[in-house]
Image (tube, rainbow, N blue to C red):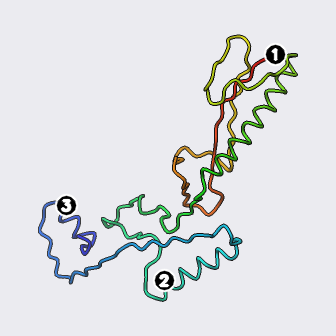
Amino acid sequence: YSSLNASQMQAMMQGMAVNNTQTQNLSVSESLKLRLTGIEKLNTQELLETIVRIVDSGKDAGVIIGNDTTPTIPGVYNPSKARNTMATFKVTNVQKLKEAAYQKAIENARAQAEQLARLTGVKLGKVISINGQGETPRGSTVVYNYGITQGNSSDGEKEHDEQPSAVFKPVPISAVVKVTFSIE
């Protein structure tokens, strides 16, 4: 159907005969994915120059780079083709970054809980549980929920050690910690 023009497509949809005497072009395409590692050692300028060299080399070789924006059906917009699929940036050491985020969240939770204890005139005790694990005696605890995010939070966050983003900006890594302290 890709060789039909709009009036031929409309005639076909109305059940009328379509005289298609045009020659049909056949095109075959295949995706090529490149993975660059070690980009954290490059500054922004060096990274952009590397990406430009890859794109220029591909274009010089006749490779079509970017999204296929030709409509599947003439005159019909396909939003899935409008997505940026040309480049995906990934953080590959997510677990290490999450551990650092958890440590910072726990430190901040203690600081906030100490401030609340000071304002209420009580003394903050030791940590009873983190993330809801451990015993929580009734009437003697301060519960503080604290979320820390490096960048913006992401609902689609994956549990494995890669975090992708289609945007060339910091990839969000987040950690949420629930810390329960005793009151003395």
The foreground one among 91 and 48 is 91
Question: Of callouts 1 and 3, which one flags the residue occurring earlier in the amino acid sequence?
Answer: 3
Which quadrant is the C terminus positioned in? Answer: top right
Compared with residue 71, is residue 80 higher up or lower down, i.e. above or below? Answer: above
Which numbered dot is residue 13?
Answer: 3
Q: Which of marks 1 and 3 is in front?
A: 1
Which numbered dot is residue 184?
Answer: 1
Question: For the residue labelled by badge 3, is the local secondary structure a helix, a strand or a loop?
Answer: helix
Residue topped by disc 2: 58
Residue 119 coordinates in the image, percent (x, y): 87, 21
- Amino acid found under the numbered disc labelled 2: Gly
Looking at the rendered structure, the number of numbered marks drawn on it comes to 3
- Amino acid found under the numbered disc labelled 3: Met
Mark 2, other Cα within 10 Å: few <14 / some 14–19 / many ≥20: few
Question: Of callouts 2 and 1, which one flags the residue occurring earlier in the amino acid sequence?
Answer: 2
Residue at image x 49%, y 73%? 34
Residue 181 coordinates in the image, percent (x, y): 74, 23
Q: Which of marks 3 and 2 is in front?
A: 2
Residue at image x 53%, y 64%? 88
Question: For the residue labelled by badge 2, is the local secondary structure a helix, a strand or a loop?
Answer: helix
Q: Could you give the CA–CA distance between mark 2 and mark 1, rounded to whole angstroms?
A: 67 Å
Q: Could you give the CA–CA distance between mark 3 and mark 2, rounded to whole angstroms?
A: 39 Å
Image quarter of residue 21: bottom left
